[in-house]
Amino acid sequence: MSLTSEERILKTLRHEEVDRIPTFEWFVDKKVIEAIYPGLSYQEFVYKADHDAICVDLNYKSEELEPHIYRDEWGIVKQDTGESHTYPIDGPIKTMRDFDKYEPPDPHAPERYLTLESELKAHQGKKAIILHLNDVFSIPSRLMGFEHFLMTLIEDPNLIEGIIEMCVEVNLKMADEAVKRGVKIIYTGDDFAHQLSPMVSPSHFKKIFFPPLCKVMGGYKDRGLYIIKHTDGEIMPLIDMIVESGIDCLDPIDPTAGMDLAEIKNKYGQRIALKGNVDCAQTLTFGSVEETIAESKKCIRIGGPGGGYIFSSGNSIHSGVKPENYSAMMDTFRKYCNYPIQV
């Protein structure tokens, strides 16, 4: 059985038989790419490394406020740190009056989808094209600034609920546009937790975030989309709600937060697919090649049997990852990825 990359991921998300474990990363830092394969673009790297997906963000305009400080179309102020992701500093909504005046980005703007259209035209059918959308946490918290968001969660939960509802509606409209263009898989990148615990209490999550999470995930599913839900951190107090919301796959089973791939596979592996989880904070960044090989083999041995598993790092291949460790991780994957799994 020989599958295309897109077929391999779709079958994995459906828990169907595949030829080998699929693999991809949300992003691979250009410094790591350059060290391993000098001169290659991200897309060229995906083919050279035999990844199964190309991940795409929507296009948002930004204006420079001062050197390295930008404001995007959501009104979120960010700092460019030189890394692949900017750092959110502040947002435009502090009060209900601000929210009443607020206008989100136009979800139907044609320029929003130029990169997506280009990637679909060039790679669909050969690689899975996975679009980054959002669910209920990242954009609302950044629209207020994180500390103010947490305070308002206690002092004015109605405002938080209104912002979340607005974000859900905008993302579902963007999903409509994505489906029209041929997108089949999306991932939502909203982190719900840090290394020690969720960022909000389970009771607050259940009351304020869980209903709109079910709405947005249900809306994506109603549109025929497969959903990979990304969240870092120690999510065990929230995991039942996350799974119940209707996702197809959970990523990355964060090893730095003590999340255990075997435990999650045993408890939830019949209901959802899993993606992860070679530790990119410690092993890939500070460990040895031998440690990387051992951890990669462990992930394949635990995640692979029975299907429903996508091999990857425990988040992404950031600029601090040792190129020799990432090469060893992928060499190990290629050696042991074929079904039946024999590690």
Image: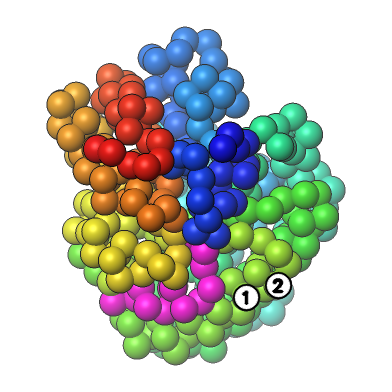
Q: How many labels were placed on the picture?
A: 2
Q: Is residue 308 above or below residue 159?
A: above
Of residue 140 and residue 289, the one placed in the foreground of this image is 289
Kindly identify which numbered label has been placed on residue 222.
Answer: 2
Q: Quadrant of the C terminus?
A: top left
Q: Is residue 79 above or below residue 274?
A: above
Instruction: Give the residues in magenta.
Output: 237-249
Secondary structure at badge 2 equals: helix
Three-letter residue code for mark 2: Asp
- Identity of the residue drawn at 15% across and 26% down: 290
Three-letter residue code for mark 1: Gly
CB contact under 8 Å: marks 2 and 1: yes
Residue 265: image location, x then y, percent = 31, 62
How many other residues sit within 10 Å of disc 1, few (<14), some (14-19) or many (≥20)?
some
Is 322 inside the magenta-drawn segment? no
Q: Is residue 27 above or below residue 226?
A: above
Q: Quadrant of the N terminus?
A: top right
Residue 300: image location, x then y, percent = 30, 43
